[in-house]
Every structure is written in C-alpha cells, then in structure tokens.
Amino acid sequence: MRILLTNDDGIHAPGLEVLEAIAARLSDDVWVCAPAEEQSGAGHSLTLHQPVRLREHGHQRFAVTGTPTDAVNLALRKLFADKRPDLVISGINAGENLADDITYSGTISAAMEAALAGIPAIALSQAMRERGASFGAAQGWAEKVLRPLIDTPMARRTLINVNFPDLASDAVKGIRVVRQGFHDYKRGSLVEGTDPRGRKYYWFGLEEMEHTLDHGTDLEAVADGYVAVTPLQLDLTNHAAIGALAEGFAS
C-alpha cells in the first residue's frame, strides 16, 4: 500500500515525525509531501498568482513552497505519475480540528484535496491546551484508529477527521464515532495594535470559552477523554432545502 503523508504545520513539524513513524508500521511505501513552512489556518487555498517549488528532503520526502492543498495537488500531479497513493494521511496537527474549525483547517483541507481526487483520506489532530504539549495520545492511539479505517471502504468525496484528546495515552478512554459539532462563534477575539511606523494592525485570535457541548459531537467526545472519529463529506448541498427553493422560483 502506498501512503502519502502531508500536513499544515510544515515539513519539519514534530507531529509529522510522529506520523511518519506510525505510517512505517502500516506500509513499506510511505511518501511525504508537505508545506515548507507552517500553513495553519490556510484552509483549502490554492496558490494561483505565483509559482510553487518542490524541494527534496531525503528519500521520498518533499516540501512545497505553498499551502497544504498545493502540496497534495503537486504530489499527485508530479510525484505519482506511475502509481497514485492508496491513502493520504494529513497531520498529526499540533492542536485539535473540531467542529466548525474544520472550515479553516489546512490539515483537513489537505485531506479534502485527496478526497476530491478520489483517494481515501484521513486527517489526524492532537488536542493541546498548552503550546508544545505532548503527542502522547496520538502516539498511543493513532495506529489503533488507522488500521480499521484502512480496511473500511470510503465513499467517493468523503474523508475521516480524527482528533485525539489532550491526555496521556493510558488515560484515553476509547474511540467514539461522532458527528461534527459547532462552536460558539463569539469565542473569537480581535487585537488591535500599532506597528513601529504608526500604522494600525489587527490580529485575529481564538479564546477558550465555557459552553454546553451537544451530545454525540466531536467536541463532547474529546472533552470526555475519547478519540473522536468523524466522517466528513465534500457535498455541502442542503438537499432538504432544494424543493422549497425550487418552488420559490417556479413560474
């Protein structure tokens, strides 16, 4: 089985190193193609107005001077002309990708790009309440999650989002398959400042807030100490609304 690894934290990220070690136990044909620099929050952006470069970092390891989407796109078009990967795994992200945060996530978007190409894709993220915290839960549980997923057929244009709680491996309670939750949108913050030239700047931030967790969601599962496994689909159509909208335009 050929596996492509990528991320949004960059080619030198510790989470990618952890993932490479885990992937090596799953396959003897592992490739890496990741952004050259951190691209957190890049979402599903594609570089269109400047060239991107592909640089080799060892055997079957490459970095792209662009976004996570660029990395997967370029890998599929340039590195795998003979045989495409059987699986794309994105991560392990330093920080969770839960609820509506998936819309901003470069980690998720890299997996989305693979899913668009018809390749099974999994995104892995490790919750961290403190910067530089441990990947312990992911190290202890990622293989337990990945092996069943590899053997489970995935529908086209779907992907799996996996989040590990911020706990030691032996403190994790188990695995839950759950739906996507939603945050309180008011949790964001805006910091206003002045640069050395006297010009204003603005810095977006996210703040932890207490809120009621919906039952059966990724937010609840991780908060309760479980690994959250959430199937996602790329079809964003609100199918239930099509009929009502069509009636409104009927002549």
Image (spheres, helix red, strand yellow):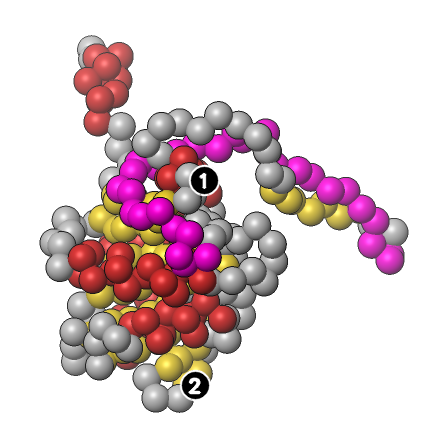
Q: Nearer the viewer, residue 228 or 250?
A: 228
Which mark identifies residue 71? none
Name the residue that disc number 1 marks.
223
> In terms of secondary structure, where does tag 2 sit?
loop
- Furthest residue to the front? 170
**Where's the C terminus, which quadrant?**
top left
Q: Position of residue 70 (x, y in %)?
A: 40, 65
Q: Which part of the image, by quadrant, shows the N terminus?
A: bottom left
**Would residue 244 appear left or right of 34 to someone viewing this image?**
left
Q: CA distance from mark 2 to mark 1?
A: 37 Å
Residue 50 in percent (x, y) is at 50, 68
In the displayed structure, 13 sits above or below 127; it is: below
Q: Secondary structure at mark 1?
A: helix
For marks 2 and 1, the one nearer the N-term is 2
Which residue is at the front of the view, 212 or 181?
212
Q: Residue at x 41, y 86 (%)?
A: 56
Which residue is at the front of the view, 176 or 12? 176
Task: Residue at 19% x, 18% y: name it.
Answer: 243
Q: Is residue 70 magenta?
A: no
Q: Which residue is mark 2?
A: 57
* The magenta stretch spans residue 176: yes
For residue 222, which quarter of the picture?
top left
Three-letter code for the amino acid on which mark 1 is drawn: Ala
- Report the number of numbered marks: 2
Taking the spot 48% from the left edge, 51% from the top edge, the residue there is: 166
The span shown in magenta is 168-197
